[in-house]
Image: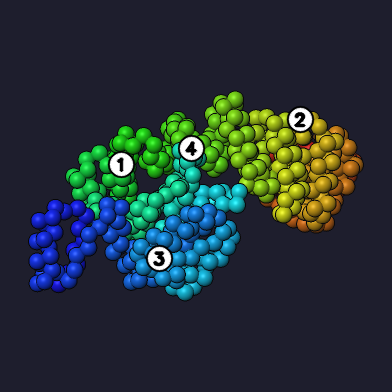
Amino acid sequence: MKNVYIVKSSQPELDELEKKKRTELKTYYLLKESEVVIVRYSDCILDFARNKAGVFLVLTEDKMFLQTVRAALHVDLGLSDEHIRSANSIQRGMQELEKLLLQGRRPAILMEHVLRSEPSLRALRWLKENHKDIPVIILSLEVKADSLAQYHEAGADNFITKPASTNVLVEKLAFTIEPQSEFQALVRQGKDYLEYNDFENALATAELILEKKPNSAVGFMILGDALKGLARREEALRAYKSAEAGADMYLEPLGRILLFYTEENDETGQLEYLRKMDRISPYNLDRKLHLGKLLVKTDKAEEAKKHLDAAMDMAAGEGKEKLAAVGQEVAEQYMGSDPALAESYYRTSINAARASMDGLKPLAFNRLGLSLRRQGRWKEAVAEYLEAERLSPQDENIQFNIAMALADGEDWVGAAERLDRALVINPQFHAGHKMVCYHLGTIYMKADRKADALPYLQHLQSIQPGFKGVDKLLEKLGD
């Protein structure tokens, strides 16, 4: 005996079913068209909740959407409240997730793309780095594709645009927690083989996928990953490019091609695919930094600054700590080519650090001082180094940097006194460092402290004879 669900039938067909009901059928149900999706996918969702310890965790402040979820799962599918949890902030959502995991539950998460004015992107990245098997559906109102692209890139399993009907909600949940077709099952199988480095079986599965759907981008992706795992790199690249050709807005193949060119140290290829990915998803901070750094390296200064400034703006949106870190990273890119520009980024970093929970770091002042020295502004460099000294008074490197700035201004006595302090902190900080030994020797000589200069120049001569004319300096000391 079994149940049968009927969507539409003529009266004779219904009469026939009524006869069968007496002998073959447990019962039959005449459904409205709006109920078809719920019935089609109910077994998948009920199995997840009742047999696999599943629970749906909804992170939203949208009471209407939460009501839709509860109506679909509780009223239409008959799930109890223990299978539906909610939180109205990311922090509370993560606390609830931790409780569920400790209870041995298997969560599926529905999370707003912005919750309480806080983008959930960082939470999504954390989830996919630490709990990659937890499916995550991102909820949003109508927003630009390039804004949501970064969520897809971070690993979102699906998206729901609000307001959403019960049918849309149920269908999305089912497709996210369980493959709903033979094709989807093959894709999941191929990805599982890759997860366990079973590249031969992954390759065979990719070929089956492409037999069923010859232009499948995901099929070519699995094929490329399998070929790369088998050290067939050029074939892998061709597969990734086939995936790219099959899906204009699909970021994953572009990311694989970028990684390929990075591994090959092919800067031209890297730039091409960084730009392509940036056009599709322009709000990825790490990629902006990568692109900007590479443009600096390849002498494309104007374009580089545009992307690095955009990275700074994105970092500012993530908080003062992030801005301080990114500002310092950006400044480093210009230390060799444009010390004045490096200085401006260091100052932005320091100002952000002053207002952050992390506080100031002596390294920022140290690097700012170096950028000032390279501009010939040694007095300002000393002032910044003194700020670093205030934060870290027992750092011999800061004392050495102050000595070098004073030497730039030909204050040899002051420079020698700072070297004394460095050597008190760490008497061996010069050991094995040729340039440090050279500067110790020359500064002490010019400060008219020849006896102090001698051991450092002798040490230098022992590790590299004749380095920067050290032999001649030793001759002068002997006169």
**Label 4, on which residue?**
144
Compare residues 256 and 37 and report the one nearer the observer: 37
Name which residue type carries label 2: Gln
What amino acid is labelled 4 in the image? Lys
Query: Where does the C terminus fall, quadrant-wise?
Result: top right
- Foreground: 31 or 335? 31
Looking at the image, is mark 1 or mark 3 earlier in the sequence? Answer: 3
User: Percent from the top left, x then y, of residue 445?
Assistant: 85, 40
* Tag 3: amino acid: His
Residue at 53%, 39% in the rendered image: 283
- The residue under label 3 is 74
> Which residue bears the numbered disc 1?
217
**What residue do we see at 20% from left, 49% from top?**
208
- Residue 372 place in picture, x, y as percent: 77, 34
Which structural element holds mark 2? Answer: loop
Of badges 1 and 3, the one in the foreground is 3
